[in-house]
Image (cartoon, helix red, strand yellow):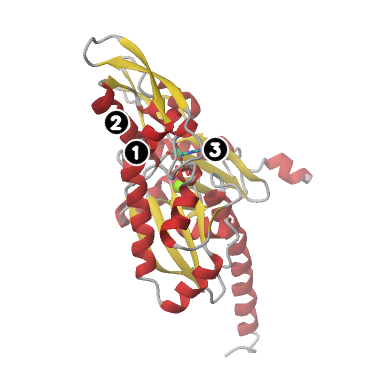
Amino acid sequence: MGFFSNLFGFGGRDMAVDLGTANTLVYVRGRGIVLSEPSVVAVDARTGEVHAVGVEAKRMLGRTPGTIQAIRPLKDGVIADFDVTEEMLRHFIQRVHQNRFAHPRVVVCVPSGVTGVEKRAVEEACLSAGARQAYPIEEPMAAAIGAGLPVADPTGSMVLDIGGGTSEVAVISLGGIVVSASIRVGGDEMDDAIVSHCKHQHKLLIGQQTAEEVKLEIGSGADMPETVTAEIRGRDMVTGLPKTLSLSSDEVRIALEEPVSQIVAAVKDTLDRTPPELAGDIMDRGITLASGGALLQGMDERLRNECQMPCHLTESPLTCVAVGSGRSLEEFEAIHRMNRSRSNRRRRGRLN
Ligand code: ADP
Ligand code: MG
């Protein structure tokens, strides 16, 4: 890095933000991913003052005293709390944006379930955090670019993005989304399903965090060669006392069946609506799985069996969307340059 860029920090560099329901990542042009934190904010319930953001705030989820609230502002794939989302976005952008005088352009990836008004609001939040301009990008497109799929070619590529609050499926060809589906079922619903299973089958109340840990440890979306168990702790609903329980992976798979089958159904429905030529391309190339939820054991196998076609995980599912948004940032520059030279040529009278 040269003298000037050191002098000015990388604040002036354009960046891409993957504003996820579970995690937010920031990619800075020329540097790659510089920040990856849970999308959680701890605020004082009385004053609205922010106590902590990211990892620190996530540790407080379900553990706060009455006055502090740990909030996930994008729960369920929508912006549940706009003010807190804006606060969080501003916090993350400013953390990497060291030079207050340089205004970067920001590509921001939002879950496709958000409304037009919310999308506009996210752009506003980027601007108020110091961006010169904000450009929204659709999540499946960012995921496909990040996965290295040939999005610009006249060939069909299918991506399945399983995030925290939503799952999105899309068929992409010639740089555009041809068919897609977005459902409000993702990793969070899997956690909820485990909470509800423990409550109904074992009369044990467990927290969301515990449920997520169980999912990561022994959860699966297809039959596994061996059964394993995990010890979990919660509160016995009958005695009201803390209790430890041993859960088997078979039991967890049954608990996860509903969200998993909803995701599979969304993929099948999208395939059903795919034009035949593109469906043929997808038969050859398969379905690419991205985002955290795709890491559920056996998820790829389950899709392979049910959809009868190849399925594979991207190299780094958790960073794929941020990397793809970042790459679109680089491309942008190329498009911009191309337009500029074209208008120069036009001025010189060679075009038109
Ligand atoms: P978002 O884009 O919505 O922020 P992410 O792509 O960051 O979502 O994925 C977060 C989700 O992925 C969470 O629900 C998390 O529990 C889940 N997840 C992460 N790793 C795994 C894993 N190994 N197995 C199953 N689920 C996982
Ligand atoms: Mg995401």
The quarter in which the N terminus is drawn is top right
* Viewer-closest of 294 and 331: 294
Q: Are marks 2 and 1 in contact (CB under 8 Å)?
A: yes
Residue type, mark 2 in image = His
Image quarter for residue 76? Answer: top left
Task: Measure the alpha-carbon separation of dots 2 and 1.
Answer: 9 Å
The quarter in which the C terminus is drawn is bottom right
Q: At which x and y percent is residue 75?
A: 34, 39
Which residue is identified by label 1?
Answer: 254
Q: Is 323 located above or below residue 351 in the figure?
A: above
Q: Given this view, does label 1 or label 3 mark the residue nearer the observer?
A: 1
Q: At which x and y percent is residue 78?
A: 32, 46
SS at badge 1: helix
SS at badge 3: strand
Q: Is mark 2 within 8 Å of ligand 1?
A: no
Which residue is identified by label 2?
Answer: 197
The disc, 1 or 3, on the residue closer to the chain's N-terminal end is 3
Q: At which x and y percent is residue 64?
A: 35, 17
Q: At which x and y percent is residue 59?
A: 45, 22
Task: Measure the alpha-carbon separation of dots 1 and 3.
Answer: 32 Å
How many neighbours does mark 3 have within 10 angstroms: few (below 14), some (14-19), or many (20 or more)?
some
Which residue is identified by label 3?
Answer: 36
Q: Is residue 290 visible?
A: yes
Task: Measure the alpha-carbon separation of dots 3 and 2.
Answer: 31 Å
The disc, 2 or 1, on the residue closer to the chain's N-terminal end is 2
Residue type, mark 3 in image = Ser
Residue type, mark 1 in image = Ile
Tell me what residue is drawn at x 40 percent, y 30 percent.
41
